[in-house]
Image: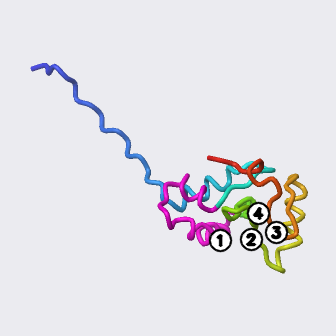
């Protein structure tokens, strides 16, 4: 007996993408010459209010696991302040100069809002 509705094929399962995977993908999408904040990155990846505190750890782990293209210098604090340390300061400043991002003596992005990348 013929049925009115042919049997449907089961859809392929959608692979689950973790918060960490979304963070890495979004970080890699920040264009040269732009910066974003830890909070904006966390929100774009679907994280809640406290998720921004995990961004550095997630990206650091991805880097240790072989993802060496992460633009750490393009992720800054919400007030435009950059993260720097004596070990990485010269390298980061060179990257900012190369990308046309100006940083003041207090380690803040000059014209921060103009350099801000929104997802």
Q: Residues within 10 Å of mark 2 (few under 14, many from 20)?
A: some
- Residue 34: percent from left, percent from top: 76, 51
Helix or strand or loop: what does disc 1 sit on? Answer: helix
- For residue 83, the mark is 2
Disc 3 vs disc 2: which is toward the camera?
3
Q: CA distance from mark 4 to mark 2?
A: 8 Å
The residue identified by callout 1 is 60
The residue identified by callout 3 is 107
Q: Are marks 1 and 4 in contact (CB under 8 Å)?
A: no
**Residues shaded magenta:** 38-67
Disc 1 vs disc 2: which is toward the camera?
2
**Left or right of residue 117: residue 25:** left
- Residue 32: percent from left, percent from top: 79, 50
Q: Is residue 42 above or below residue 34?
A: below
* Earlier residue among tags 1 and 2: 1
Q: Are marks 3 and 1 in contact (CB under 8 Å)?
A: no
* Earlier residue among tags 3 and 2: 2
Q: CA distance from mark 3 to mark 4?
A: 12 Å
Q: CA distance from mark 3 to mark 2?
A: 8 Å
The residue identified by callout 4 is 73
* Earlier residue among tags 3 and 1: 1
Q: CA distance from mark 3 to mark 1?
A: 22 Å
């Amino acid at each position: 007996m013929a049925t009115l509705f042919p049997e449907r094929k089961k859809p392929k399962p959608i692979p689950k993408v973790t918060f960490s995977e979304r963070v890495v993908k979004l970080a890699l999408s920040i264009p040269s010459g732009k910066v974003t904040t830890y909070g904006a990155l966390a929100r774009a990846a679907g994280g809640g209010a406290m998720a921004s505190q995990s961004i550095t750890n997630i990206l650091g782990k991805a880097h240790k696991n072989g993802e060496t293209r992460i633009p750490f210098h393009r992720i800054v604090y919400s007030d435009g302040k950059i993260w720097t340390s004596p070990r990485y300061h010269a390298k980061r400043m060179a990257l900012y100069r190369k990308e046309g991002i100006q940083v003041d003596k207090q380690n803040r992005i000059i014209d921060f809002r103009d350099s801000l990348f929104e997802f």
